[in-house]
Image: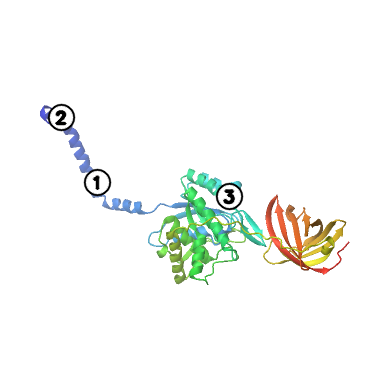
Amino acid sequence: MAVVGGEYAPQLISMRCPRILLCLLVAMAGLTAHAARPAQTANAMATSRIPPRIRILYIGNSAIYFHNFPDIVKSLAASGPDPIDIESTMVAEGGQTLEGHWLEGKALRQIRDQHWDYVVLQEQSTLGDDLRIDGISRIRGWESYQRFVKMFDSEAKAVGAKTVILSLWNHKGTPAREQQALDYASQSVARETGAILVPAGSVWHAMERRDPKIDLFHDDFHPTRTASYMFAIAFIAAVFHKNPDSLATRATGTDIDIDQQSTARADVVLADVPKLQADEIKQTAYGVVRRGAREVARPAEPATPKLPQGRAATNDDFVGAWSGTENLLSAEPTPITLDISSRGEDLLANVGLGLKPPVEEKAIQGGLAGNVVWFDDPKGVDGSFIRYRGVLVQNDLKGVTELWLQNKLIAIGTFSAHRTEKVGKQ
């Protein structure tokens, strides 16, 4: 009806009265019931304040199974005045890349078969594409890393999960350019996918600047328990936007046998950091996370060794026995011997390397191009191709060794040798 008053008003009231009375009775009954169950309502409200369990899937390698990083996160998140209840699963294998996890399939099945709130991605320490230069592993590229982050991110989004990228720290003793490459690769793909970035490398170096004596390296890469605690603090701050000040200084959980990569003992202390140091870690990690990631420029390609300028030479200048050292697969100098002989216009070298286990000395063909002597070994270790190139600098033989595998340069290093005998074996 468009008109409520006037001639139609009495009829409308008489038609609505039974419904009005019924509504009043139902409302009164509801009020009575509410008054009779105050304790039940309070209990229901209290239950609604309990945060739901958060499920996290971790995909990575030894950087996260060292000291059981997921359990450290779980233990610390449950501490403090606003605890977070976490259930986590870890798919990790030593040295594994995201590409390897994708091809293996186990991580994918975990994502697709269960409900997750977060999927954490942790790449191999050199982003799966490294080049050894004088025995030191250097990051060459990150295209494969970013491609598989995007692929895993799509799978996570398909099940309603948020992707978290755990950005790593560079190996001990490597140039700052390596950390720049790690940060650039992770920041750019996080920006593109909208993933949460945990800047572990930035936190690592900020803490080292604050306390140069802090012990973060277990070896040349893996974290100590203190470092794993630090990353867990950064993780909680970045993922849950939580100030870590009130979090515990000790974390407990299931320990992992690092050598066997398997569960060792349950209910043990995974990390126990002195309060003063823990407070410094919390302040540093939270400060880095709050400031956000500093924009990192794309790093330059790593510099590779070049042949020095050598003097003019003939075949006879190289004939003889040479002894020295090489840096190719190890940063520690490896003994090398070359017994060079002449076969017409060609050269032949018996090359010996002081490796452990030892590698049998073998003869390889070579020659002279200008003033550069070269020797090629098409049947190197594990099916590799090895090329030696050298020049004479004064009376020493100095050169560059390249190791190729499946048409890809894997390692490049330098060698230097001095002549021990003038005449080589014939």
Marks 3 & 2, CB-CB < 8 Å contact: no
- Can residue 328 be seen here? no
- The residues tagged by marks 3 and 2 sit, at their Cα atoms, a distance apart of 72 Å
Residue behind mark 1? 33
Q: Amino acid at mark 1?
A: Ala
Q: CA distance from mark 1 to mark 3?
A: 64 Å
Type of amino acid under label 3: Glu
In the current view of this chain or complex, which residue is farthest to the top? 7
Numbered disc 2: secondary structure = loop
What residue does disc 2 label? 3
Whether residues under marks 1 and 2 lie with C-beta atoms below 8 angstroms apart, the answer is no
Say few, some or many: other residues with alpha carbon within 10 Å of mark 2 (under 14 / 14 to 19 / 20 or more): few
Q: Position of residue 283 (x, y in %)?
A: 43, 66
Q: Residues within 10 Å of mark 3 (few under 14, many from 20)?
A: some
- Reading the chain from its start, which is encountered first: label 1 or label 2? 2
Question: Which of pointers 1 and 2 indicates the residue nearer the eye?
Answer: 2
User: Quick one: label 1 or label 3, which is nearer the N terminus?
Assistant: 1
Closer-to-camera residue (125/67): 125
Picture coordinates of residue 272, whole percent (x, y): 49, 68
> Considering only order in the chain, which callout, 2 or 3, is on the residue closer to the N terminus?
2
Secondary element at image label 1:
helix
Between 184 and 63, the residue placed more toward the observer is: 184
Q: Position of residue 423 (x, y in %)?
A: 86, 66
As helix, strand or loop, the secondary structure at mark 3 comes to: helix
Report the number of numbered marks: 3
> Is the C-beta separation of discs 1 and 3 under 8 Å?
no
Q: Nearer the viewer, residue 417 or 82?
A: 417
Residue flagged by tag 2: what amino acid is it?
Answer: Val
Query: In which quadrant of the rendered view does residue 330 lie?
Result: bottom right
Mark nearest the camera among 3 and 2 is 3
Disc 3 target residue: 143
**Is 233 rendered above or below residue 52?**
below
